[in-house]
Image (cartoon, rainbow, N blue to C red):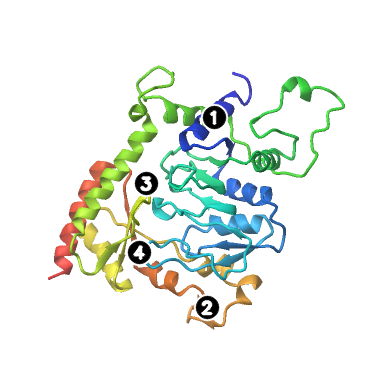
Amino acid sequence: MKNGSAVAAFERAFADYVGARYAIALCNGTATLHTALVALGVKPGDRVAVPPLTMSATTIAVLHAGAVPHFVDVDPETWLMASREGVPAPTWMPVSLYGLHAGFPGRGIVVDAAQTLQPYRLPSGLAPSFVSYSFQASKILALGEGGILVTDDEELATRAREFSSLGYRMRADQPRIDPAVLKAPDYTRHHALGWNYRMNDLTAAEGLRRLCWPASASPRPLTNSSSRPVDRALEVRRKAAVLYAAALLECPWLVAQLVPAGWMHDFWAFAVACDTPARAQWLQEAVVRHGGERPYGAWRLTYHEPAFRDAWWLAKHVNNWDAEGNPKGLCPVAESLQPRILQFQTNDLEAARRNAGALQAAIVEGSR
């Protein structure tokens, strides 16, 4: 196998899978976000809009680019970053939270789709500048680590390829340089500064296997997509979501993340919000008491994490602080939701059946 050949094959297969022209495979999902911002021309000091209700890697990528995070509140029902109206940020990084597609099209949009395997284009046919996917161990296409950027824009793809390859002069569709060219003593490698974010061939080969071939078959592409491991993984998660949704029917104090009509949800997790933080803490214990696995709470809001809450660029926009020194009132919907959200796992159907049964029993107990 030539160096980079598995990466090239994986990139082509993934681009076809999500319906994009170009894919750039990198070492992880934070690297993809950083690379996308640089490819878009984000400069130190620029504002980038991000939601606070998500894993903090989204904001960390903005800081890697030298930019300033601008936290935007979330919708109270979908829990996704709210409207762009009135927000002074030229670049937006919405997150497809828990697997619900963020749905922001247009130039200057980088969709953090780490928790999905959604198509690149929206149902309307529109697309953002970049969509970033993750292959970290908990993700739907779990390769242990890795990430990939997709775009239809050749210029953006070329910039992303070059930045993530140490600034080597590259092409949008070329993950490695021809070794014969590299051997020339006068070859100029670095025409720009970049980072070494490239994916390795072993990770790419495993990604290609899961994307294209059944686990028990010889390594050849299939015409029947339902036999692909990645499609089976998505099917398991959607079946698990049906079990959880049935368990909380008619529960007056528990609501699931809203999936608007026509939107897609890959159910990286099945997330619910209780009516109060105290009820959420009680429900965690009650699910365990009835034989289920303790559900995850939501990540702390990014600006409540110690590494961020004292940053100068945040403090200048905050007027109120709680008793623990956390910013208060910056994104009130997210602040209300975060202590009330619980996440139920969807990657194992048998475990989901047990957890859904435990959830239903807990609801009965809590409704007496």
Q: Nearer the viewer, mark 4 or mark 3?
A: 3
**Label located before the other in sequence (1 or 4):** 1
State yes or no: discs 1 and 4 in contact (Cβ < 8 Å): no
Q: Residue at x 64, y 52 (%)?
A: 37
Seen from the viewer's position, the closer of residues 139 and 163 is 163
Residue found at the very far right of the displayed protein: 186
Q: What residue would you read off at disc 2?
A: 325
**Label located before the other in sequence (1 or 2):** 1
Q: Nearer the viewer, mark 4 or mark 2?
A: 4
Task: Name the image quarter holding residue 26.
Answer: top right
Cα gap from disc 1 to disc 3, whole angstroms: 22 Å
Q: Residue at x 50, y 44 (%)?
A: 134
Cα gap from disc 4 to disc 2, whole angstroms: 22 Å
| Vertical position of residue 175 compared to residue 2: above or below | below
Q: Position of residue 330 (x, y in %)?
A: 52, 75
**Label located before the other in sequence (3 or 2):** 3
Question: How many C-alpha atoms fall within 10 Å of the one at disc 2: few (<14), some, or many (≥20)?
Answer: few
Seen from the viewer's position, the closer of residues 346 and 285 is 346
Cα gap from disc 1 to disc 4, whole angstroms: 37 Å
| Vertical position of residue 210 compared to residue 59: above or below | above
Evaluate whether residue 291 shows in this view.
no
As drawn, the label of residue 266 is 3
State the SS at label 1.
Answer: helix
Given the image, on which type of amino acid does mark 4 rest?
A: Ile
Q: Position of residue 337 (x, y in %)?
A: 38, 69
As drawn, the label of residue 204 is none
Q: Residue at x 72, y 39 (%)?
A: 166
Q: What residue would you read off at disc 4?
A: 341
